[in-house]
Image: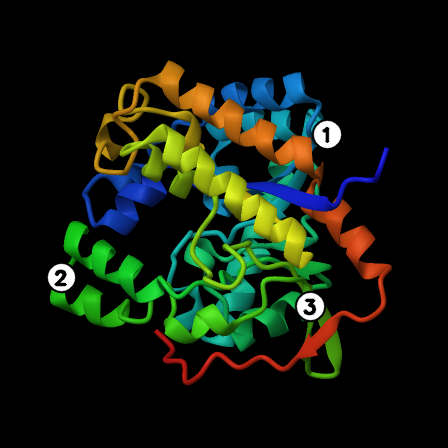
Amino acid sequence: MPQKPLASLSLDLDNKWSYIKTHGDPGWENFPSYLDVVVPRVLEILHKRDLTITFFIVGQDAAIEANQPMLKSIADAGHEIGNHSFHHEPWLHLYSEEDIAKELATAEEAIIAATGVKPVGFRGPGFSVSEGVLKVLVDRGYRYDCSTFPTYLGPLARAYYFMTAKLTPEEKESRKKLFGTLADGLRPNKPYRWNVGGSTLLEVPVTTMPVIKIPIHASYILYLAKFSPFVAKLYLRMALLFCRVMGVEPSFLLHPLDFMTEQDAPELSFFPAMRVPLDKKLALMDDILTMLTSQFEVLSMSGFVQRAESRSGLRSLQPNFGPQQSV
């Protein structure tokens, strides 16, 4: 039997409070959580499929004692633990390098205390990345980053965010570069190495549709399924086919809300697909995972990185994120 091409699978474990905070709603300061609902649900689904993936954990959640048993259960189940920042602010790329270093170090300490695992991989909240972030990752001995999202739809996502979030004019001004620019669509879809101050760091982009660079991660498929489940699944089949034809090994992204409904988190009912009944949503997620695993050998991020690092011919790029403004 021919060997399957590789894919990586990860889940950004954004918690309820982080979505409320980004949306501009009150009450996030109490750090409301749904981890006790979503973590067992996801772990059971992954166990049934014998999948080992990467969970990118927010440091603030790891620092809260009540959350620690759930987070420890992820590591105990054999999944990789990654760093998803401490405060989960999608404007991390606007931080000074000093503040980035503090952000990542604080998150590491909390994650290690909660799970017993030191992260070797990082994903910026809201795909936020900068040269300063990459420098700090190299300085702290990280093995890989996976914060880039090569899509042309960043400005559209930002417009939707500003239209739906409850932000002051000052907040909108400070977040005007969220979700990137049209130029992000020109970034590679395949892994490459960043050249950072004489050192290198492997970058594994979150995969978008080859050539046209529109999203293919699970939340986007669920959004399309609101209009037509058939079209949504056809879209994913086409995307995975294009990946195979063009030699793109998909880095496929999950989020907690892919496995939840408004009954689990009424405050987040404004998100797409949150009003889909749970049985239908989980059935569609099952179809999504079946499509991925039937066509690819699915690994955690570190498992994928280990295989990718052994290859020759990876591109090397200089960080170029344009002018940044510290906050």
Q: Residue at x 58, y 68 (%)?
A: 188
The quarter of the picture where the N terminus appears is: top right
Q: Which residue is mark 3?
A: 192
Q: Pick whichever, 106 or 134, lies toward us.
A: 134
Residue 307, image x, y percentages: 82, 52
Which amino acid, mark 1?
A: Gly
Residue 326, image x, y percentages: 38, 77
Which type of secondary structure does the marked residue at label 3 adopt?
Answer: strand
Q: Residue at x 58, y 45 (%)?
A: 240
- Whichever of labels 3 and 1 marks the residue nearer the N terminus, that label is 1
Q: Is residue 314 left or right of residue 237?
A: right
Q: Is residue 71 left or right of residue 21?
A: right
The quarter of the picture where the C terminus appears is: bottom left
Q: Residues within 10 Å of mark 1 (few under 14, many from 20)?
A: few
Residue 32, image x, y percentages: 33, 32
Relative vertical location of residue 158 with respect to residue 187 in this rendering, above or below: above
The label on residue 78 is: 1
- C-alpha gap between disc 3 and disc 2: 38 Å
Which type of secondary structure does the marked residue at label 2 adopt?
Answer: loop
| Residue 261 visible somewhere in the drawing | yes
Q: Which residue is mark 2?
A: 168
Q: Pick whichever, 288 or 270, lies toward us.
A: 288
